[in-house]
Image (spheres, rainbow, N blue to C red):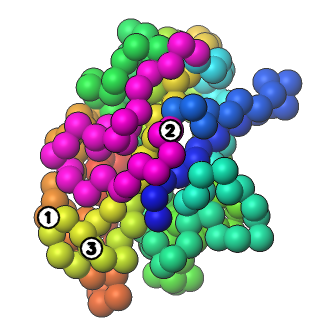
């Protein structure tokens, strides 16, 4: 799997549909080092001179697909046994049009492994044509933010450096009357190569899966 093509859609429908494919360079390989700056927004990406507006409390939909330009719902969005968690972070920045993600990030959504159904977060993406709905916390203070969507492929994660991190960042401007400014973690720094949710043999798991990174901030 080379890269994700990612789309951010805004609800309600009056906000239309915004495609952010220009944030990606086709052919990005997965990031495998948790200590690299590439863990922020992927390799070769850079800010662009645009930002989408979203009201705090609204739902945004992140869409991920394994191959550039391939959004056919009859095929798995993330196939090839690339099982793993899906997470979404946000970072408040002075300008989403220039920031490279070096500030702090707080997590607003995550899905790991459901031991009852034996399904991963990536399985849910495949069942929903690559889409995941995420609510922007209603209490969030207005301003510019980066949204970081990530899936971690764990099919070869039994050895150190085997986990594959796929992520991209979106540029948004949050409006509303919220006042919350949550603290967060830094990338790199939020993950350790030996974290139990990163260095793991998913085919010999016992017990619950530990999703990497901080707990979800709900506001």
Q: Disc 1 vs disc 2: which is toward the camera?
A: 2
Q: What is the x, y in percent for residue 207?
A: 31, 82
Is label 3 in a helix, a strand or a loop? loop
Q: Residue at x 37, y 36 (%)?
A: 44
Position of residue 136 in the picture relative to residue 205 (left or right): right
- Which residue is disc 3 drawn over? 157
Q: Give the number of marks.
A: 3
Q: Residue at x 29, y 43 (%)?
A: 39
Residue 45 forms part of the magenta stretch: yes
Q: Residue furthest front?
A: 27
Numbered circle sitting on residue 24: 2
Marked residue nearer the N-terminal end (2 or 3): 2
Residue 145 forms part of the magenta stretch: no
Q: Residue at x 34, y 81 (%)?
A: 202
Q: Is residue 94 above or below residue 83?
A: above
Q: Is residue 145 visible?
A: no
Numbered circle sitting on residue 194: 1
Q: Which residues are magenta?
A: 24-50
């Amino acid at each position: 799997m080379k890269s994700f093509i990612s789309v951010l859609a805004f609800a309600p429908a009056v906000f239309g549909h915004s495609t952010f494919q220009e944030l990606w360079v086709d052919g990005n390989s997965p990031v495998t080092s948790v200590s690299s700056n590439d863990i922020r927004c992927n390799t070769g990406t850079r800010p662009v001179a645009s930002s989408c507006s979203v009201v705090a409390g609204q739902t945004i939909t992140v869409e991920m697909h394994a191959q550039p330009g391939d959004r056919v719902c009859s095929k798995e969005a993330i196939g090839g046994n690339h099982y793993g968690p899906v997470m979404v972070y946000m970072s408040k920045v002075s300008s989403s049009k220039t920031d490279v993600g070096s500030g702090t990030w707080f997590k607003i959504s995550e899905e790991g492994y459901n031991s009852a159904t034996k399904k991963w977060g990536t399985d849910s993406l495949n069942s929903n044509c690559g889409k995941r709905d995420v609510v922007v916390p209603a209490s969030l203070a207005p301003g510019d933010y980066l949204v970081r969507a990530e899936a971690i492929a764990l099919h070869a994660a039994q050895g150190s450096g085997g986990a594959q991190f796929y992520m991209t960042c979106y540029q948004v401007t949050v409006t509303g009357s919220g006042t919350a400014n949550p603290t967060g973690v830094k990338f790199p720094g939020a993950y350790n190569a030996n974290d139990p949710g990163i260095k793991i043999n998913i085919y010999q798991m016992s017990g619950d899966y530990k999703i990497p990174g901080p707990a979800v901030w709900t506001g």
